[in-house]
Image: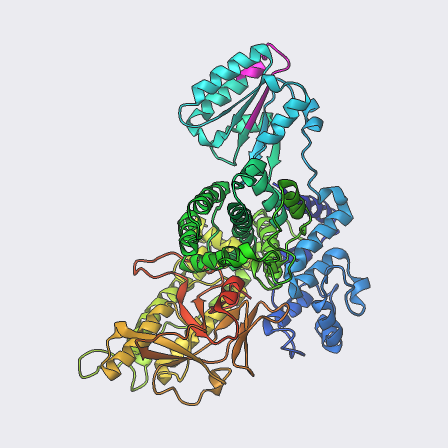
Amino acid sequence: FSRHKLIYSFLIFTSIFRNNKEISGPEWNFLLRGGFGTAPKNPDPAFMPQLTWETVAGLQEAMPDLFPDLCQSMSGKIKEWKNWAAAEAPQTTPLPGVWNDSLNSFQKMCVLKIFRREKLVFATENIVAEKLGKSFTESPPIVLAEIYPDTSPTTPIIFVLSTGSDPTGALIKFAEDRGVLNKFQSISLGQGQGPVAEKLVAASTKVGNWVCLMNCHLATSWMSAMEKMVDNFSVKPPEDSEFRLWLTSQPSTAFPVSVLQNGIKLTNEPPKGMRANLIGTFTTLGEEEWESCTEDKRNEQYWKKLVVGLAFFHGITQERRKYGPLGWNIRYEFNTSDVLCAKDVLKMFVRNFPDMPWAAITYITGHVNYGGRVTDDQDRRCLMSILETYYPGEDVVQDEGYKFSDSGTYFSPPLGDFKALMSYFENLPMVDNPEVFGMHDNANIAFQLQETISIYDTVLGLQPKVGGGVSEGEKSPEELVDDYAATFEEQMPEVLDRENACGDMFQVMPNGALRSLDTVLIQEMDRFNRLINTMTSTLKELRKAIKGLVVMSADLEEMFTSFQNNATPGLWTRVAYPCLKPLASWFKDYLRRVEFFKSWCEKGQPSSFWLPGFYYPQGFMTGALQTHSRRYALPIDKLDFSIVIKNMEGAEDVGEAPEDGVYITGLYLEAGRWDRRQKKLKPSNPGEMMSLMPIVHMLPILDYVPNPADYMAPLYKTNLRAGVLNTTGQSTNYILDVNIPTDENPRFWVLMATAMVCMSND
């Protein structure tokens, strides 16, 4: 598919240039895996977080001949570096100082990775075009007339489908252009259709018909019969040389490999963006459907205005997927059947109800037609908020200039014929601005970062698991991994021991039970001890396997590869907490977590709690509620947390613990920021994906009812957001909703996908 073309072209380019020694091993390794070094004093922590600054030092240490005194140079010209990093297109903006002339395009990508990783997708495209030619970065349109001369009666033509694509229309038009439409026959494969297709092909080979077998992926049991049938073409060619076999299939493991190898393969993908989506929807509906409710003026107005709104709603639900977790927590496969079903419901309401029942049509369209696919509560809230833009009530019908976006670029067109409607869609922007989705411009950064990660994770996954020969002076992969393992082994903490607890910890109360938060601490210590023991034993086993003292098992080999790729090994993640950080950052975070619980055990209950450090934050929140419940003899099922955001920034600013509730530190706000002066939730600063929150006071209140003017922000462990229900019935990612004061309508933040998370991914 087109998304794979850049990856393939980039692999061709790097393979050639690495073979020619124009890209060195350290350059390639840093671009794929990054690295950290020992950094001097950070000249500007606001511009460069400590991890970024250590990565700069890592680049200097990995290639001292190419990047001599890089840290010193940046410290001396910090303003120029800030301007470069803030540029709209840093991948084409000259680097500050001598670096622009001393580095080649590939080496500049290593610098770009540190400061603006999301722009690597554009830099990758630019360097492939520069070194191999622009044709290696573009996907040419499929023109069947140009492909047909390469076909033959014995060679099947295979359309590899993606969701939303349908090449049948183009194929029928091509058959018409060649004057063989009367000889074109198609059959959709499925249960019991295999033998029918076999007879059709056998008859068509004699008279020179074209046969299209659609949706081969649905007839998995018939694939072996189809393989034999196609293989027989080479033994006994079709009698009529005009015969052609066309196949359509989604990617499927059941599709015969020999047919793929011998056939001509074409990818067929639907165009992307709101403009293409709207045109595609109304091309499917057609002019007859557009004019189907024109029996009176009232019906025509309601039908045409609302069916356009429905098409926009359908497009938004599909196109939001490109933003990953910011779009939807779970990627739903909304398709044409959804909009066709919702269109029939709309037509029924328009024709049968003189007064439009807005609540009913909103419920059926949102909760039933589309909501039937939605399994996440936050996604359902988002879906209904989107629908509110397009089914807002009488405004969308009566207001000729009703706007679907703040800028007015997207609006409800005036009543007109089908040609005028399509003309309006044709004039919409080719590239969608995030505002049409109700999102911040920063959402584009999330989209670009997702594209970059997809490319480089794929490239990294294709790298050899072990190295061959290495240049003189370079360490072998085995030596590098052994060094990492030795470093980790040296820093491994001791298991957490309750015997080291201070005097007032783990004291039994008069009722014979431990304090609620002491129980939480014991459970967390047990979980961390399990992880510590697993990490200690696997590090020893890995080092022995590298030396050849024990067998390198599949798990240890995966661990070896993970160390090479700066990724957390599966042996560790299976017993660890959810965390998306690369290995070096993950290990630092892990040491901090262990230290937090060790301090709690040995020094007593802290005045504030670092919530991101917990394995199971929901357990801690329940423990805090239970503490309040026992103190005041209140029913715990009637208690809920009220959130008060304090003026204190970190744990060091906290004097004493609150009388009731708990202070929480370390939370981040994604797709929004907390305004310290106005004490309100505000849109993010440009380029700032996450912002650190001040101390949050979580105060249990009996029968708490949140202020409806506040935004109820979901709090997640990681910004992946999606989770699964565990055995307790709680999500593995979602923790609870946090009420945040705001001047905006809460729906504004729902569309923006604003949420709180426990950690960044750096």
Given residues 222 and 572, the one toward you in this image is: 222
* Residue found at x 70% / y 63%: 111
**Frontmost residue, 493 versus 445:** 445
- The answer to which of 507 and 428 lies nearer the viewer is 428
Q: Is residue 474 visible?
A: no
Q: Position of residue 732 (x, y in %)?
A: 38, 61
680 inside magenta stretch: no
Quadrant in which the N terminus is drawn: top right
594 lies above or below 212: below
Question: Quadrant of the image for the C terminus?
Answer: bottom right
Q: Position of residue 413 (x, y in %)?
A: 62, 51
Q: Against 260, is 89 above or below?
A: below
State yes or no: residue 244 in magenta.
yes
**Bounds of the magenta span?**
232-247
Q: Position of residue 271 (x, y in %)?
A: 62, 43
Say which residue appears at 39% left-offset and 73% top-offset: 494
Q: Residue furthest front?
A: 296
